[in-house]
Structures are given as C-alpha cells and as structure tokens.
Image (spheres, coloured by chain):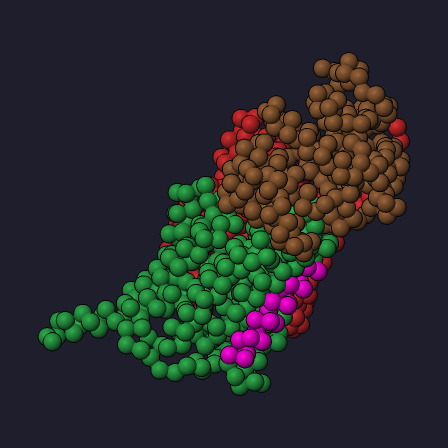
Amino acid sequence: MLELVGLNAGYGAIQIVWDVSLTVRPGEVVALVGRNGAGKSTTLKAIVGLAQVFSGSIRVGGRSLVGRPTALMASYGIGYVPQERELCANLSVEENLLVPIYARRLPRKRLGAIYERFSRLKERRNQKAGSLSGGERKLLAFARILLLDPAVLLVDEPVEGLMPAVVAEVGGLIRQLCAGGTGVLLVEQDVGLIRRTADRAYLMSRGRIEASVREIGQRELAQFLGI
Amino acid sequence: MVRSGGRERATTAVVVLALLCPLALPDFYLYTAADLIIWALLAISLDVLLGYAGLPSFGQAAFFGVPAYTIGIVVSRGGPLTLAILAAIAALLVIAMAVGYFATKTGGVGYIVVTMLASFSLFQLALVWTGLTGGENGLYLPRASSLAVLRVRAQYLVVAGLGSAVLWASRRLARSGYGLALAAVKSNERRCRALGYNVERIKLQVTLVSAGIAGIAGILYALVERALAPDLLGPGLSTEVVIWVLLGGAQTLVGPIMGAALFVTLKQVLNTFESYPLVLGLLFVAVVTWAPAGLIALRPPGRRRRRSPGGPRPSPPETGLG
Amino acid sequence: MNWRSFWESELMEYVTVQLTYGLVVGTTIALTALGLTLIFGVMHIVNLSHGEFFMIGAYCAWAADQVLHNFWGSVLVAAVGSALLGGLLIMAFQRRLADAGPLRWALLTLGLGYVLREVVQLIFGTDFKLIDAPLKGTLPWIGGIYRLVVAGLSVALIVFAMWFLNRTRYGVLIRAVAGNREATAIAGVSPLAVYGWVSVISAGLAGVAGALMLPVTSAYPSMGLEIMVAAFAVVVVGGMGNIRGALVASLVAGELEALLTLVLQPNLAILLVMTLFMAVLVVRREGTLWLW
C-alpha cells in the first residue's frame, strides 16, 4: 500500500506540490486528475525520487521512500511509467526489456512470458526502441516495468496522443494488473480512460488535492478538467 | 545587469591604485607591477569570453603568444617597431578569425577542443620552426626596438594607461546592450536563436574582442619583457589563465584581475618552491568543487520556474551546487 | 633487378613500415578516444584529464618494470593502476558535482589534469623514461615486431571493448544509462554504479594504451596532453559520443600522421593532420550536436 502524508515537493527552490496526502491500496486503480501544471507528474516524480521532497512522508508497505535513490524503487516494489522519455531509444526492444532483467538479476525466461503477452514487441525485438510507433513505445514501457512485478504502479498520462484502439489496450492492461493485486496510481486527463479504469479519484489543482471522490461522474470530471 | 555600487568602487580603487604605484615605488617594483597588469589583461580577455559569454576558451595563450612572437620575429630581423606592431595586429586578426570561426562553427564541446588544439598546435609550431621562432631558446628583442628605450616610469605609464583603458572598455562592454546579448546567448542559446539573434556571429565577435584584449597583453609583454618562449603560446599558460579567472571569480572583471595578480605574485615569491603549480592546481580543483561566489555565474541555468500558489514556502534543500 | 626497381622497393618498404607505425598510433589514439567517448556518452563529462591516465599508464609501467623486470606484467600493473586511479578520482567528485553542468566538469577535469601532470613531474622529473622493447627484431615490410604486436593487441582490445559494450550484460546497462538515465534507474540500475564502471574502464583503456606505447615513445610528462588533443580531435570529428566514428577517425589520423612523417618533421605532420581535421569538423557539422 502506498501512502503519502503532507507531501511538499518540487525542484530546487521551486515548490510545486503542496501538502498532498493520498493512499493507494493493493488491487485498486486510483486516478490523480487535474489540468496541466497541477503538480500531478511532480507528485509521481517525488515518490520515485526524481523530484525533491521538502517535507512529508511517502511510505510503501510501511517503508519510507523519502531520500531513497531512484534505482532502489524497483526493489521496493514501485514501478513507474513516465509520460515521456520512458525508454532507452538507443537500445533495441529486446535490450530495453533486458535492462530490468539484468538489473534485478531476474530469470531470462520472463522475457518469453512478456513476448507471449505482447506479440507485437516480439516481432520488433531487434528494432531500435526509438523507431517504434507511439503505441508500441507505450506498450514496451509497460512491458519493461511489468517485468519488475511491482506492488504499486505509477503511470503518468499513458494514452496522451494515442489512437483509441491503443487507449483501450492500455486500459485493459491496467485493469488486468489491479486484478492481480497491484495498486495503480494513474495520472490522467482522458475522461473516458478514467471512467473505465479508475475505482476512485483525487482531484488536484494548483499543487494541492482539492477533493477525493468515490464516484466519478463524467460531467464533474469534465468540468474539473475544463473540457 | 545592475550591480551594487560596491563593485563599482572596488574597480575604480583598483585602477587608481594601479596608476598611483609609480609615485611610491622603486624601479624594480614598477617592472613587477607592469608585469602584473599584462597578466591581468590576459585574465580580463578570458573573463570577457568565459565569464560573460560563457565560451570556454582553453587556448587563450594562442591570442597572447601570436602577436608577441610576431613582434619578436619582425624586430629580431631588424624591422622597425611600427611595422612589427602592424604585423602583430595582422597576425592576431588572422589567428583570431581562424580560431573563432572554427570554434564557433563547431560550438559547445567543439569550442573547447578547437581553442585547445590551436594553443597546442601553435606551441608545437613554435618549438619546431626554429628558423623563425628560435625553437626552445625562443627570441630576444633588442633593447632599441622595445619599450626599454623609455625610462621605467614611462614604460609603466604606457602599460598602466593601456591596461586601464582596456578595463574601462571591457566594463562598458559588459554593461552595454551588447553585454546583455552576451548574457542571453550564454544562458539560453536556443531561445536567442528563436528571437532572431545571430548567435554564431555574436560568438565570433566576442571571440575577436577577447582575442584583441589578449593580443594587447601579448604585444605589451613582448615590448616590456623582451624575452619570448614557446610557453607563451602553450596549453600550460592557457590552463593557468582559466585558473586565474575561475579562482578570482568569473564574470566580475575585478576577480580575474585579482586572481592573476595574486598568482603571478605568488609564483615569483615561491619560485624556489618546486611544487607551486601543484598547489595552484589543487586550489583550483578545490574552488571548482566547493564553488565560491565566482562560480555561481557559471551554473548553466536549466531550472524551469513555475508559479507556486501562495502560502509559506519552505526553505529549499541544498541544490548540489553548495 | 635493376637499380630503379630496387629503389622503388626500398621506398615502398619505407611506406609500409610507416603504415604499421600509423596503425600503432591510430589504435593508440582509438583506445584513448574510446574512453573519452564513453565518459562523455554516459556521464556527459568532457574529461580534460583523460590524457593524463595515458601518461600515468606509461609511468606506471616504467616504474613497475624497474621492480618486476617483466614488461607484460608491468603493463598489467599499469592497466589496473590507472583504472583504479581514474575510477576513484572521477567518482570522488561525482558525488559532489552530481548536478553540475558540463562546463563545471570541464573546468574540474582541466584542473585535475594539471594536478596529475604536476604530481608525475614531482615524482619522476621531466626527463624521458626509456625502456627497451620487450620483443626485439624487425620484419621486412613491417618494421619492429613489437610495433606489430602493439597494433594487434590494441585492435584486439578495441574489438573486445566493442563486444563488451554491445553484447554483454554490463554493456547493455552502460548503453541504457547513456540513452536514458532516469528510465534505466527506474528499472533498478544504479547510475552511480554504472558511472563507476565507466570511469574505471575509460581510464584503464587509456592506461593500457600508455603502457604499450612506453617502449615506442618512452614516457614524458606532456605525452598525455598530446594524445588527448588527438583523441579529442577524433572524438569530435567522429561525432561526440559516436564510438564507431571516433574509431575510424583515429585510424585515419594515425595513418595520415605516419605517412606525412615520411616527408615532414613529426610535429609538423601532427599539426597538418589536426588542421585537416578542423576543416572536416566545419564541413560536417552534424557531427557535433552537443550544446551546453
């Protein structure tokens, strides 16, 4: 279980996230909703140590993550799929998948399981990741994080600019994951995806959590996002 | 860039002090003072380039040594001094154009590499081309065609006068609109380009200005010191200038002058102390690592500012520069 | 055989002997440039102290040879010594300068190089440290056997390094960090650990190159500066961070220099090659993408 209490975070002298508290329990998909610049992405980055935490606590299964290096997140069961630059574009598809395997000394046969699940990646295994289409890139980014078998998955706007078919695929993937017991914190602006996948949502604006909602109504969401 | 009046006063004080020296000191110290002014000019030349425009010239000695050698070569072949100075200016122009062109064309790391290469190549050339440069023995200017014909006081006044003129001009440059353009290019090249600045031309121009200042220093050196050696062109001196500027505090003009003065003096005082350059190097490494005020100006500004919504702001943690 | 063809064969032998020497110079530059590219590609550091590890390799080998009286053992000592020193130095500052920009790193390594040069001068003095080639004898058309062996060893080392980077587990992780540090860290790789390997490998390659060149050029304090200038030139010409480009440029530089030495003084030959490279730089600007 992921638990944030009173998190203040940002970059250097600039504070972006103000007093954010939230929880993600195993097996649920929690959406973090807000407009551009609301501080959603920075919240995720602060959790994995890519933004500075000024004060507050971040705990996973009782263990504090504050001040821990990003490279240890995988061993703490945290997975993170950033919005952009989520792959090593200079490496082939297979090498991208090998990175977590080598890093965590996982058995190589997990690669086979991933290829079974994502046959498109298998077809393109020797292609450079930088030459993949947007949808394939996102799938590869998910695939390499799935190899780590995270207990908590942080996903930052996974479907922005993708075709509807891929959006559905990503949504299915997220539901499948939480059915397996993974807690997912989903930063998203796509109302359709939020409604289809999320169990509940936090509404965030100007760096603060404004509300926590159980039932996600389409109209309220759209209004909040200003669409 | 508006600065407090303290620096203004400090600069004026330095200039006045430098000019007052001849009234109080015996001849030997005048020589030393003239020497210091020459090295300070070299430091200023690099500060204009590295400090204000953010262009890392690691071969500044090339702009210093080439005109010095040109004077030496013409004069030691019996040429008149006027011709020598004209030739020196021409040679400097050629070398500065060539290095500046190549360095700005390649940009970024290329600037370091090209300037370093220039200094290194000219050093090698001075060593190899013994017929022209005297090789390792260097050149010696005859007394008659140098500033040595003047009395020491007069020599000193020439150097000090030129030096303060250059300092004044550099300060004017740094504070002018052009200085702002340099700062803009230094902090965000891409944006400058988008705003319609011809970034490459600005870089080439400032390289030429810097080379000009270094060239004045080189010409003065040849005329006052009269002994030329390949080291005046080499990577050793080029590195030392960077050290002076950084130690003193880049982008201040006064800092590099102090740096040069301090370290040239120390060198003369400690010339029996064999490991002096080592101490200088260690000090430099320490300064770069533990970042004094002078270094802050060198931090590439990459952090994006965002508006934060009211409320008390917690004191930010150390940002890695401290 | 008439006198004319005799002359021609004599001249031809000159040329082929120089070609071997060019290969030695080229592969030496390549080994040094490889480390330079690696550190730049992975850590984004313009390492201006890199050449000093070449020099330290040579001095290390000389000192070890005084004790061991075994050249190949000394090369090994030099490799390990320079690798450890390089790794320790860079990593010691990596902690402090983690967020520093490339200019500050360039200044720091400039200072480090200066310090290393001065330290070596204090310890060993400024005179040339000579050593006899461990393999005597010359071959017709090729020249000294030792030179041939050095060229062979260097080529083998380069091939090994490329294999290591492209095919092994550590190679993949190194390239992953070079490509995207944060995404790689998320997958559980510590960038700091990778930086450690990279700085060790980089200094080690330069050290081996220096040790192997000891019997050819002997050891002297400015040798590191000289090789570094050449290595930088080839790295920039090859395209910053582009290993293959740097390797090709190294070989071209070595051969050109060796052949020009037939008609020019060696230092002038180097100058000419460098000037040529500058011209190439300006002609193909896409080779230099890096901005501060």
The one of A176 and C171 positioned closer to us in this rendering: A176
Q: Is residue B288 magenta?
A: no
Residue A200: image location, x then y, percent: 82, 26
Split into 4 quadrants, where in the image is the N terminus of chain B? top right
The hue used for chain B is red
Q: Quadrant of residue A31?
A: top right
**Which of the 4 image quarters holds residue C171?**
bottom right
The x and y percentages for residue B197 are 54, 29
Assign the magenta stretch its main secondary structure.
helix
Residue C232 can be seen, yes or no: yes
Report if residue C76 lies within the magenta region: yes
Q: Which chain is green?
A: C
Left-right relation of C136 to B42: left
The residue depicted at 64 percent of the width and 30 percent of the height is: A169
Relative to A97, does residue C133 appear above or below in the rendering? below
Q: Left or right of A218: which side holds A169?
A: left
Query: How far across and how far down the image is residue A92, in percent?
Result: 53, 45
